Protein backbone atom coordinates (compact mmCIF):
# COMPACT_ATOMS: atom_id res chain seq x y z
CA UNK A 1 0.00 0.00 0.00
CA UNK A 2 1.99 3.06 -1.21
CA UNK A 3 1.91 5.76 1.46
CA UNK A 4 3.97 8.92 1.85
CA UNK A 5 4.18 11.16 4.90
CA UNK A 6 5.47 14.70 5.40
CA UNK A 7 4.83 17.46 7.94
CA UNK A 8 3.53 21.01 7.60
CA UNK A 9 2.14 23.63 10.00
CA UNK A 10 -1.40 25.05 10.30
CA UNK A 11 -1.85 28.48 11.86
CA UNK A 12 -4.88 29.72 13.79
CA UNK A 13 -4.00 33.30 14.62
CA UNK A 14 -0.39 33.31 15.81
CA UNK A 15 -0.74 29.84 17.26
CA UNK A 16 0.41 26.91 15.15
CA UNK A 17 0.06 23.13 15.18
CA UNK A 18 1.88 20.41 13.29
CA UNK A 19 -0.08 18.79 10.47
CA UNK A 20 0.68 15.29 9.19
CA UNK A 21 0.34 15.25 5.39
CA UNK A 22 -0.36 11.69 4.20
CA UNK A 23 -0.61 10.67 0.54
CA UNK A 24 -2.17 7.31 -0.30
CA UNK A 25 -2.17 5.76 -3.79
CA UNK A 26 -4.85 3.21 -4.71
CA UNK A 27 -5.85 1.48 -7.96
CA UNK A 28 -8.68 3.11 -9.86
CA UNK A 29 -9.43 5.93 -12.19
CA UNK A 30 -6.97 8.85 -11.88
CA UNK A 31 -8.19 11.28 -9.24
CA UNK A 32 -6.81 13.63 -6.59
CA UNK A 33 -8.83 13.93 -3.37
CA UNK A 34 -7.80 16.34 -0.61
CA UNK A 35 -9.39 15.90 2.85
CA UNK A 36 -8.88 17.51 6.24
CA UNK A 37 -10.79 20.84 6.32
CA UNK A 38 -8.88 22.71 3.57
CA UNK A 39 -9.96 26.21 2.59
CA UNK A 40 -10.38 27.35 -1.01
CA UNK A 41 -6.72 28.29 -1.53
CA UNK A 42 -5.61 24.93 -0.17
CA UNK A 43 -8.18 23.00 -2.21
CA UNK A 44 -6.67 24.52 -5.34
CA UNK A 45 -3.37 22.84 -4.42
CA UNK A 46 -4.50 19.83 -6.46
CA UNK A 47 -3.92 21.64 -9.74
CA UNK A 48 -0.79 23.49 -8.59
CA UNK A 49 0.87 20.33 -7.29
CA UNK A 50 0.07 18.25 -10.39
CA UNK A 51 1.49 20.89 -12.76
CA UNK A 52 4.54 21.55 -10.55
CA UNK A 53 5.42 17.85 -10.37
CA UNK A 54 5.07 17.37 -14.12
CA UNK A 55 7.12 20.47 -14.92
CA UNK A 56 9.86 19.38 -12.51
CA UNK A 57 10.63 16.24 -14.49
CA UNK A 58 8.91 13.87 -12.03
CA UNK A 59 6.39 11.15 -12.92
CA UNK A 60 2.84 11.91 -11.85
CA UNK A 61 1.05 8.69 -10.74
CA UNK A 62 -1.97 7.90 -12.90
CA UNK A 63 -3.96 6.37 -10.02
CA UNK A 64 -6.38 7.53 -7.35
CA UNK A 65 -4.51 9.78 -4.91
CA UNK A 66 -5.95 10.64 -1.51
CA UNK A 67 -4.15 13.28 0.55
CA UNK A 68 -5.17 13.61 4.20
CA UNK A 69 -4.30 16.51 6.49
CA UNK A 70 -4.35 15.41 10.13
CA UNK A 71 -5.72 16.36 12.58
CA UNK A 72 -8.78 16.55 10.37
CA UNK A 73 -10.70 18.74 12.82
CA UNK A 74 -8.17 21.61 12.58
CA UNK A 75 -8.93 24.20 9.87
CA UNK A 76 -6.15 24.57 7.28
CA UNK A 77 -5.79 27.61 5.11
CA UNK A 78 -3.39 29.06 2.61
CA UNK A 79 -1.00 27.71 0.02
CA UNK A 80 1.86 26.87 2.36
CA UNK A 81 0.95 23.16 2.27
CA UNK A 82 1.81 22.76 -1.43
CA UNK A 83 5.38 21.56 -0.95
CA UNK A 84 4.42 19.07 1.77
CA UNK A 85 1.62 17.64 -0.41
CA UNK A 86 3.80 17.30 -3.50
CA UNK A 87 6.61 15.64 -1.53
CA UNK A 88 4.21 13.20 0.14
CA UNK A 89 2.78 12.19 -3.27
CA UNK A 90 6.28 11.63 -4.70
CA UNK A 91 7.30 9.59 -1.65
CA UNK A 92 4.24 7.37 -2.11
CA UNK A 93 4.59 7.03 -5.87
CA UNK A 94 8.29 6.43 -6.26
CA UNK A 95 9.92 6.18 -9.69
CA UNK A 96 11.46 2.91 -10.87
CA UNK A 97 13.76 4.81 -13.21
CA UNK A 98 15.22 7.10 -10.54
CA UNK A 99 16.70 6.92 -7.06
CA UNK A 100 14.01 6.75 -4.37
CA UNK A 101 13.45 9.73 -2.10
CA UNK A 102 14.88 9.18 1.38
CA UNK A 103 12.10 9.61 3.98
CA UNK A 104 14.69 9.60 6.79
CA UNK A 105 15.73 13.11 5.72
CA UNK A 106 12.22 14.34 6.56
CA UNK A 107 12.23 13.24 10.20
CA UNK A 108 11.56 16.19 12.51
CA UNK A 109 11.32 18.38 9.39
CA UNK A 110 8.53 20.66 8.18
CA UNK A 111 7.96 21.76 4.58
CA UNK A 112 6.54 25.27 4.05
CA UNK A 113 6.19 26.74 0.55
CA UNK A 114 3.76 27.46 -2.24
CA UNK A 115 4.38 25.80 -5.60
CA UNK A 116 4.27 27.62 -8.89
CA UNK A 117 3.05 25.76 -11.94
CA UNK A 118 6.67 25.55 -13.13
CA UNK A 119 7.77 23.96 -9.88
CA UNK A 120 9.27 27.11 -8.39
CA UNK A 121 8.93 27.61 -4.61
CA UNK A 122 7.17 30.82 -3.64
CA UNK A 123 7.27 32.47 -0.18
CA UNK A 124 4.17 32.32 2.01
CA UNK A 125 2.81 34.35 4.88
CA UNK A 126 3.25 33.46 8.52
CA UNK A 127 6.51 31.51 8.26
CA UNK A 128 7.94 32.92 11.50
CA UNK A 129 5.03 31.90 13.79
CA UNK A 130 4.76 28.58 11.91
CA UNK A 131 8.43 27.73 12.45
CA UNK A 132 8.24 28.88 16.07
CA UNK A 133 5.28 26.57 16.68
CA UNK A 134 7.09 23.70 14.95
CA UNK A 135 10.19 24.25 17.09
CA UNK A 136 8.10 24.06 20.26
CA UNK A 137 6.83 20.67 19.01
CA UNK A 138 10.32 19.26 18.53
CA UNK A 139 11.01 20.07 14.87
CA UNK A 140 14.68 20.75 14.14
CA UNK A 141 14.72 21.35 10.36
CA UNK A 142 12.72 23.51 7.97
CA UNK A 143 12.63 23.45 4.17
CA UNK A 144 11.06 26.57 2.71
CA UNK A 145 11.25 28.97 -0.21
CA UNK A 146 14.45 30.94 -0.47
CA UNK A 147 12.53 34.16 0.10
CA UNK A 148 11.37 32.94 3.53
CA UNK A 149 14.72 31.54 4.70
CA UNK A 150 15.91 34.66 6.53
CA UNK A 151 12.59 34.97 8.34
CA UNK A 152 12.52 31.27 9.33
CA UNK A 153 16.13 31.47 10.57
CA UNK A 154 15.06 33.92 13.28
CA UNK A 155 13.78 30.97 15.34
CA UNK A 156 16.67 29.60 17.45
CA UNK A 157 17.49 25.90 17.41
CA UNK A 158 16.12 25.24 13.90
CA UNK A 159 18.18 24.47 10.80
CA UNK A 160 16.71 26.22 7.75
CA UNK A 161 17.19 25.25 4.12
CA UNK A 162 15.90 27.80 1.64
CA UNK A 163 15.45 26.34 -1.86
CA UNK A 164 14.21 27.68 -5.18
CA UNK A 165 12.31 24.79 -6.76
CA UNK A 166 10.76 21.38 -6.32
CA UNK A 167 13.63 19.96 -8.39
CA UNK A 168 16.07 21.08 -5.71
CA UNK A 169 13.89 19.52 -2.99
CA UNK A 170 13.79 16.13 -4.73
CA UNK A 171 17.54 16.28 -5.39
CA UNK A 172 18.12 16.96 -1.70
CA UNK A 173 15.98 13.95 -0.74
CA UNK A 174 17.91 11.77 -3.23
CA UNK A 175 21.32 12.84 -1.85
CA UNK A 176 22.12 14.38 -5.23
CA UNK A 177 23.77 17.71 -6.02
CA UNK A 178 21.24 20.50 -6.20
CA UNK A 179 20.51 21.64 -9.75
CA UNK A 180 21.15 25.26 -10.61
CA UNK A 181 18.05 27.43 -10.77
CA UNK A 182 17.83 30.93 -12.24
CA UNK A 183 17.25 33.89 -9.99
CA UNK A 184 13.58 34.56 -9.33
CA UNK A 185 12.05 37.14 -11.66
CA UNK A 186 11.93 40.68 -10.37
CA UNK A 187 8.39 41.74 -9.49
CA UNK A 188 6.89 44.77 -11.19
CA UNK A 189 8.09 47.86 -9.44
CA UNK A 190 10.89 45.87 -7.83
CA UNK A 191 14.61 46.44 -7.92
CA UNK A 192 16.67 48.22 -5.33
CA UNK A 193 14.49 49.73 -2.57
CA UNK A 194 14.47 53.49 -2.33
CA UNK A 195 16.62 54.73 0.56
CA UNK A 196 14.57 55.54 3.61
CA UNK A 197 14.52 59.17 4.59
CA UNK A 198 15.37 60.39 8.07
CA UNK A 199 12.69 59.70 10.70
CA UNK A 200 10.54 62.67 11.68
CA UNK A 201 12.07 64.68 14.49
CA UNK A 202 10.18 66.19 17.41
CA UNK A 203 12.13 69.40 16.88
CA UNK A 204 9.96 69.97 13.79
CA UNK A 205 7.01 70.79 16.08
CA UNK A 206 7.11 74.45 17.05
CA UNK A 207 5.77 75.45 20.45
CA UNK A 208 3.12 73.12 21.95
CA UNK A 209 5.03 72.53 25.20
CA UNK A 210 2.08 70.93 26.99
CA UNK A 211 1.36 68.56 24.12
CA UNK A 212 5.05 67.66 23.79
CA UNK A 213 5.20 66.84 27.50
CA UNK A 214 2.10 64.68 27.22
CA UNK A 215 3.72 62.87 24.28
CA UNK A 216 6.78 62.19 26.43
CA UNK A 217 4.61 60.82 29.25
CA UNK A 218 2.69 58.62 26.81
CA UNK A 219 5.94 57.21 25.42
CA UNK A 220 7.47 56.60 28.86
CA UNK A 221 4.47 54.75 30.31
CA UNK A 222 2.61 53.40 27.27
CA UNK A 223 -0.43 55.56 28.04
CA UNK A 224 -3.23 56.28 25.57
CA UNK A 225 -3.39 59.91 24.45
CA UNK A 226 -6.17 62.13 23.08
CA UNK A 227 -5.17 65.31 21.26
CA UNK A 228 -7.92 67.87 20.63
CA UNK A 229 -7.42 71.03 18.64
CA UNK A 230 -8.18 72.93 15.44
CA UNK A 231 -6.59 71.95 12.12
CA UNK A 232 -2.96 72.87 11.62
CA UNK A 233 -1.89 72.96 15.26
CA UNK A 234 0.38 69.91 15.00
CA UNK A 235 -1.71 66.95 16.23
CA UNK A 236 -0.67 64.68 13.36
CA UNK A 237 2.94 65.81 13.55
CA UNK A 238 3.08 64.97 17.24
CA UNK A 239 1.54 61.53 16.75
CA UNK A 240 3.90 60.65 13.89
CA UNK A 241 6.89 61.43 16.11
CA UNK A 242 5.79 59.26 19.01
CA UNK A 243 7.34 56.01 17.66
CA UNK A 244 10.73 57.74 17.48
CA UNK A 245 10.61 58.35 21.25
CA UNK A 246 10.15 54.66 22.03
CA UNK A 247 13.20 52.45 22.66
CA UNK A 248 14.05 49.66 20.25
CA UNK A 249 12.18 46.40 20.69
CA UNK A 250 13.75 43.63 22.73
CA UNK A 251 14.44 40.33 20.98
CA UNK A 252 11.25 38.80 22.36
CA UNK A 253 9.15 41.81 21.39
CA UNK A 254 10.74 41.96 17.92
CA UNK A 255 9.80 38.34 17.27
CA UNK A 256 6.21 39.00 18.40
CA UNK A 257 5.85 42.01 16.10
CA UNK A 258 7.57 40.28 13.18
CA UNK A 259 5.27 37.27 13.49
CA UNK A 260 2.19 39.51 13.24
CA UNK A 261 3.56 41.38 10.23
CA UNK A 262 4.43 38.07 8.57
CA UNK A 263 0.86 36.84 9.06
CA UNK A 264 -0.49 40.02 7.51
CA UNK A 265 1.89 39.80 4.56
CA UNK A 266 3.46 43.23 5.15
CA UNK A 267 6.90 42.05 6.26
CA UNK A 268 9.70 43.56 4.20
CA UNK A 269 11.71 40.61 2.75
CA UNK A 270 14.88 42.71 2.96
CA UNK A 271 14.32 43.37 6.68
CA UNK A 272 13.09 40.06 8.13
CA UNK A 273 13.14 41.25 11.75
CA UNK A 274 11.18 44.31 12.91
CA UNK A 275 13.31 46.04 15.54
CA UNK A 276 11.62 49.44 15.75
CA UNK A 277 8.16 50.02 17.29
CA UNK A 278 5.58 49.93 14.46
CA UNK A 279 3.25 52.78 13.55
CA UNK A 280 -0.23 52.20 12.15
CA UNK A 281 -2.50 55.01 10.98
CA UNK A 282 -5.62 53.60 9.28
CA UNK A 283 -7.91 55.93 7.34
CA UNK A 284 -11.13 56.94 9.09
CA UNK A 285 -13.12 54.95 6.52
CA UNK A 286 -11.48 51.68 7.68
CA UNK A 287 -13.80 48.84 8.68
CA UNK A 288 -13.86 47.00 11.98
CA UNK A 289 -12.08 44.04 10.37
CA UNK A 290 -9.30 46.34 9.14
CA UNK A 291 -8.75 48.01 12.51
CA UNK A 292 -9.43 45.21 15.00
CA UNK A 293 -9.07 42.14 12.78
CA UNK A 294 -11.38 39.77 10.94
CA UNK A 295 -12.14 38.42 7.52
CA UNK A 296 -13.57 35.21 6.14
CA UNK A 297 -12.50 31.92 7.66
CA UNK A 298 -9.93 32.30 10.41
CA UNK A 299 -9.70 36.08 11.05
CA UNK A 300 -6.49 37.96 10.33
CA UNK A 301 -4.84 40.62 12.49
CA UNK A 302 -5.98 44.22 12.18
CA UNK A 303 -4.20 47.53 12.67
CA UNK A 304 -4.43 47.35 16.46
CA UNK A 305 -2.41 44.11 16.41
CA UNK A 306 -0.03 45.28 13.69
CA UNK A 307 0.72 48.22 16.02
CA UNK A 308 1.61 45.81 18.86
CA UNK A 309 4.47 47.29 20.93
CA UNK A 310 4.13 50.47 18.88
CA UNK A 311 1.62 53.22 18.13
CA UNK A 312 -1.91 53.12 16.70
CA UNK A 313 -2.93 56.58 15.50
CA UNK A 314 -6.54 57.40 14.67
CA UNK A 315 -6.56 60.78 12.97
CA UNK A 316 -9.96 62.48 12.78
CA UNK A 317 -11.10 59.95 15.37
CA UNK A 318 -14.75 61.13 15.52
CA UNK A 319 -15.06 60.32 11.80
CA UNK A 320 -14.46 56.61 12.42
CA UNK A 321 -17.58 54.46 12.56
CA UNK A 322 -18.89 53.98 16.10
CA UNK A 323 -18.57 50.15 16.00
CA UNK A 324 -14.90 50.51 15.02
CA UNK A 325 -14.13 52.80 17.95
CA UNK A 326 -16.07 50.74 20.47
CA UNK A 327 -14.35 47.56 19.30
CA UNK A 328 -11.09 49.05 20.59
CA UNK A 329 -12.29 49.07 24.19
CA UNK A 330 -11.45 45.43 24.92
CA UNK A 331 -7.94 45.51 23.36
CA UNK A 332 -7.11 48.69 25.26
CA UNK A 333 -8.05 47.02 28.52
CA UNK A 334 -6.59 43.53 28.03
CA UNK A 335 -3.82 44.09 25.50
CA UNK A 336 -5.09 41.41 23.13
CA UNK A 337 -7.81 40.74 20.57
CA UNK A 338 -9.96 37.61 20.65
CA UNK A 339 -11.83 37.03 17.37
CA UNK A 340 -14.29 34.15 17.37
CA UNK A 341 -15.58 32.83 14.05
CA UNK A 342 -17.23 29.63 12.90
CA UNK A 343 -13.91 28.43 11.43
CA UNK A 344 -12.02 29.02 14.68
CA UNK A 345 -10.98 31.51 17.33
CA UNK A 346 -7.89 33.62 16.74
CA UNK A 347 -6.04 35.46 19.51
CA UNK A 348 -3.69 38.29 18.63
CA UNK A 349 -1.62 40.50 20.96
CA UNK A 350 -2.55 44.18 20.81
CA UNK A 351 -0.48 45.98 23.43
CA UNK A 352 -0.09 49.31 21.64
CA UNK A 353 -0.16 53.00 22.54
CA UNK A 354 -3.36 54.54 21.18
CA UNK A 355 -3.33 58.16 20.00
CA UNK A 356 -6.62 59.83 19.10
CA UNK A 357 -6.74 63.17 17.31
CA UNK A 358 -9.90 65.18 16.89
CA UNK A 359 -11.13 68.66 16.16
CA UNK A 360 -13.10 70.55 18.82
CA UNK A 361 -16.12 70.73 16.49
CA UNK A 362 -17.10 69.80 12.93
CA UNK A 363 -15.59 72.97 11.45
CA UNK A 364 -12.59 72.71 13.75
CA UNK A 365 -12.47 76.34 14.88
CA UNK A 366 -14.19 76.20 18.31
CA UNK A 367 -11.17 77.13 20.41
CA UNK A 368 -12.53 79.99 22.46
CA UNK A 369 -10.30 82.44 20.59
CA UNK A 370 -11.02 84.98 17.89
CA UNK A 371 -11.84 82.39 15.25
CA UNK A 372 -15.11 82.12 13.39
CA UNK A 373 -16.77 78.83 14.36
CA UNK A 374 -19.92 78.15 12.37
CA UNK A 375 -21.13 75.17 14.42
CA UNK A 376 -24.12 75.29 16.73
CA UNK A 377 -23.84 74.07 20.31
CA UNK A 378 -25.93 71.01 19.39
CA UNK A 379 -23.56 70.18 16.49
CA UNK A 380 -20.59 70.44 18.83
CA UNK A 381 -22.16 68.11 21.38
CA UNK A 382 -23.07 65.58 18.72
CA UNK A 383 -19.56 65.72 17.30
CA UNK A 384 -17.96 65.18 20.72
CA UNK A 385 -20.39 62.34 21.47
CA UNK A 386 -18.96 60.30 18.58
CA UNK A 387 -16.15 59.35 20.96
CA UNK A 388 -18.08 57.34 23.53
CA UNK A 389 -17.58 57.69 27.26
CA UNK A 390 -16.43 54.07 27.72
CA UNK A 391 -13.72 54.58 25.08
CA UNK A 392 -12.49 57.87 26.53
CA UNK A 393 -12.51 56.31 29.99
CA UNK A 394 -9.64 54.12 28.75
CA UNK A 395 -7.58 57.12 27.56
CA UNK A 396 -5.10 58.27 30.20
CA UNK A 397 -3.93 61.61 28.80
CA UNK A 398 -6.06 64.36 27.28
CA UNK A 399 -4.50 67.51 25.87
CA UNK A 400 -5.93 70.57 24.16
CA UNK A 401 -3.62 71.49 21.29
CA UNK A 402 -4.27 75.17 20.60
CA UNK A 403 -2.51 77.60 18.24
CA UNK A 404 0.68 78.71 20.06
CA UNK A 405 0.95 82.27 21.32
CA UNK A 406 4.05 84.40 20.91
CA UNK A 407 7.30 83.10 19.41
CA UNK A 408 7.30 79.76 17.67
CA UNK A 409 10.34 78.43 19.51
CA UNK A 410 12.00 75.13 18.60
CA UNK A 411 11.74 72.43 21.24
CA UNK A 412 13.97 69.50 22.09
CA UNK A 413 14.83 66.89 19.49
CA UNK A 414 13.58 63.30 19.39
CA UNK A 415 17.00 62.08 20.55
CA UNK A 416 16.97 64.26 23.67
CA UNK A 417 13.42 63.35 24.68
CA UNK A 418 13.92 59.70 23.71
CA UNK A 419 16.86 59.44 26.09
CA UNK A 420 14.63 60.47 29.00
CA UNK A 421 11.93 58.07 27.85
CA UNK A 422 14.43 55.19 27.71
CA UNK A 423 15.72 56.02 31.20
CA UNK A 424 12.16 56.13 32.56
CA UNK A 425 11.28 52.81 30.93
CA UNK A 426 14.39 51.22 32.39
CA UNK A 427 13.41 52.51 35.83
CA UNK A 428 9.88 51.10 35.55
CA UNK A 429 11.20 47.81 34.08
CA UNK A 430 13.42 47.38 37.14
CA UNK A 431 10.44 47.94 39.43
CA UNK A 432 8.25 45.54 37.43
CA UNK A 433 10.93 42.84 37.10
CA UNK A 434 9.51 39.38 37.80
CA UNK A 435 5.99 40.41 36.74
CA UNK A 436 4.24 39.96 33.37
CA UNK A 437 4.02 43.76 32.91
CA UNK A 438 6.57 45.93 31.12
CA UNK A 439 5.11 49.45 31.32
CA UNK A 440 3.13 51.39 33.89
CA UNK A 441 0.04 51.38 31.66
CA UNK A 442 -0.17 47.58 31.99
CA UNK A 443 -0.17 47.37 35.80
CA UNK A 444 -3.59 46.28 37.16
CA UNK A 445 -5.31 48.50 39.70
CA UNK A 446 -5.20 45.89 42.44
CA UNK A 447 -1.40 45.80 42.19
CA UNK A 448 -1.24 49.58 42.39
CA UNK A 449 -3.16 49.48 45.64
CA UNK A 450 -1.37 46.45 47.11
CA UNK A 451 2.28 46.61 46.03
CA UNK A 452 2.86 50.13 44.71
CA UNK A 453 0.51 52.29 46.71
CA UNK A 454 0.85 56.04 46.19
CA UNK A 455 1.47 57.79 49.49
CA UNK A 456 -0.59 60.92 48.75
CA UNK A 457 -3.67 60.06 46.68
CA UNK A 458 -6.11 62.49 48.33
CA UNK A 459 -6.76 64.40 45.12
CA UNK A 460 -7.69 61.22 43.29
CA UNK A 461 -10.00 60.12 46.09
CA UNK A 462 -11.65 63.53 46.12
CA UNK A 463 -12.19 63.44 42.35
CA UNK A 464 -13.82 60.01 42.63
CA UNK A 465 -16.10 61.13 45.46
CA UNK A 466 -17.18 64.20 43.50
CA UNK A 467 -18.00 62.13 40.43
CA UNK A 468 -15.36 63.83 38.26
CA UNK A 469 -13.37 60.59 37.98
CA UNK A 470 -14.45 56.99 37.51
CA UNK A 471 -12.86 54.12 39.41
CA UNK A 472 -11.08 53.03 36.23
CA UNK A 473 -9.97 56.61 35.74
CA UNK A 474 -8.55 56.67 39.28
CA UNK A 475 -6.37 53.66 38.55
CA UNK A 476 -5.19 55.17 35.29
CA UNK A 477 -4.35 58.50 36.93
CA UNK A 478 -2.22 56.65 39.48
CA UNK A 479 -0.41 54.81 36.68
CA UNK A 480 0.39 58.15 35.06
CA UNK A 481 1.72 59.45 38.38
CA UNK A 482 4.20 56.56 38.46
CA UNK A 483 5.34 57.46 34.94
CA UNK A 484 5.84 61.08 35.97
CA UNK A 485 7.93 59.88 38.91
CA UNK A 486 10.01 57.66 36.62
CA UNK A 487 10.67 60.59 34.28
CA UNK A 488 11.73 62.73 37.25
CA UNK A 489 13.94 59.98 38.71
CA UNK A 490 11.94 59.61 41.91
CA UNK A 491 11.37 56.29 43.69
CA UNK A 492 7.70 57.04 44.38
CA UNK A 493 5.16 59.58 43.04
CA UNK A 494 4.89 62.82 44.95
CA UNK A 495 1.74 64.84 45.56
CA UNK A 496 2.69 67.04 42.62
CA UNK A 497 2.96 63.98 40.36
CA UNK A 498 -0.55 62.90 41.36
CA UNK A 499 -1.90 66.41 40.80
CA UNK A 500 -0.33 66.63 37.33
CA UNK A 501 -1.56 63.15 36.40
CA UNK A 502 -5.07 64.15 37.45
CA UNK A 503 -4.85 67.37 35.43
CA UNK A 504 -3.78 65.45 32.33
CA UNK A 505 -6.64 63.03 32.90
CA UNK A 506 -9.40 65.61 33.42
CA UNK A 507 -8.41 68.06 30.67
CA UNK A 508 -11.28 68.66 28.27
CA UNK A 509 -13.82 66.39 29.99
CA UNK A 510 -16.45 69.09 30.16
CA UNK A 511 -17.59 68.00 33.56
CA UNK A 512 -18.43 64.37 32.76
CA UNK A 513 -16.82 61.54 34.68
CA UNK A 514 -13.35 60.69 33.39
Image (tube, helix red, strand yellow):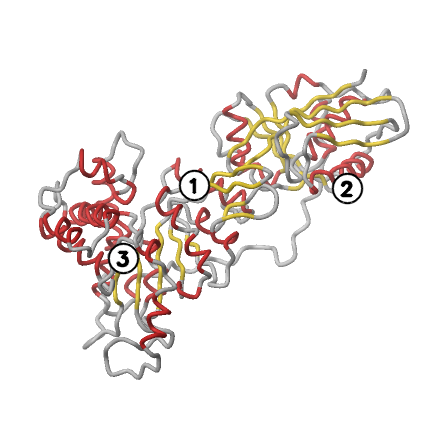
Crowding at dot 1, Cα within 10 Å, few <14 / some 14-19 / many 20+, comes out as: many
Residue 140 locus on image (x, y percent): 55, 23
Of 195 and 211, which appears nearest the observer?
Answer: 211
Measure how far apart labels 1 and 3 are at the Cα level: 23 Å
Q: Is residue 343 above or below residue 402?
A: above
Residue 469 locus on image (x, y percent): 21, 53
Dot 1 corresponds to which residue?
349
Closer to the camera: disc 2 or disc 1? 1
Q: Residue furthest right?
A: 29
Number of the label disc, if any, that sits on residue 118? 2
The residue lying at 49 percent from left, 43 percent from top is 260
Dot 3 corresponds to which residue?
215
Measure how far apart labels 2 and 1 are at the Cα level: 38 Å
The residue lying at 9 percent from left, 42 percent from top is 455
Of 36 and 308, which appears nearest the observer?
Answer: 36
Q: Dots 1 and 3: beta carbons under 8 Å?
A: no
Residue 318 locus on image (x, y percent): 40, 65
Amino acid sequence: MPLGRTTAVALVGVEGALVDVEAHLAPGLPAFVLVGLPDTALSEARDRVRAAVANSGERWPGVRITVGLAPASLPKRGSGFDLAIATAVLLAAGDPDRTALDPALLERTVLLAELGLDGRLHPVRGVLPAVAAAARSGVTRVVCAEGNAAEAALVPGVSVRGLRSLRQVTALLRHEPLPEEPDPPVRAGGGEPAPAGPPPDLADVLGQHQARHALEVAAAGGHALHLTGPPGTGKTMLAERLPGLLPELSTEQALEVTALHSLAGILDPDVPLVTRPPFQAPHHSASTAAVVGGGSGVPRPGAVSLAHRGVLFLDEAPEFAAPVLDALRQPLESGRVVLARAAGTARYPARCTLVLASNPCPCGLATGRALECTCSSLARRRYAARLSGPLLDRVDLRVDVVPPLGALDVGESTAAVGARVTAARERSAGRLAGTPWRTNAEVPGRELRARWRVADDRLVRSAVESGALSLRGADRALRVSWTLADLAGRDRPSGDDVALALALRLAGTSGRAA
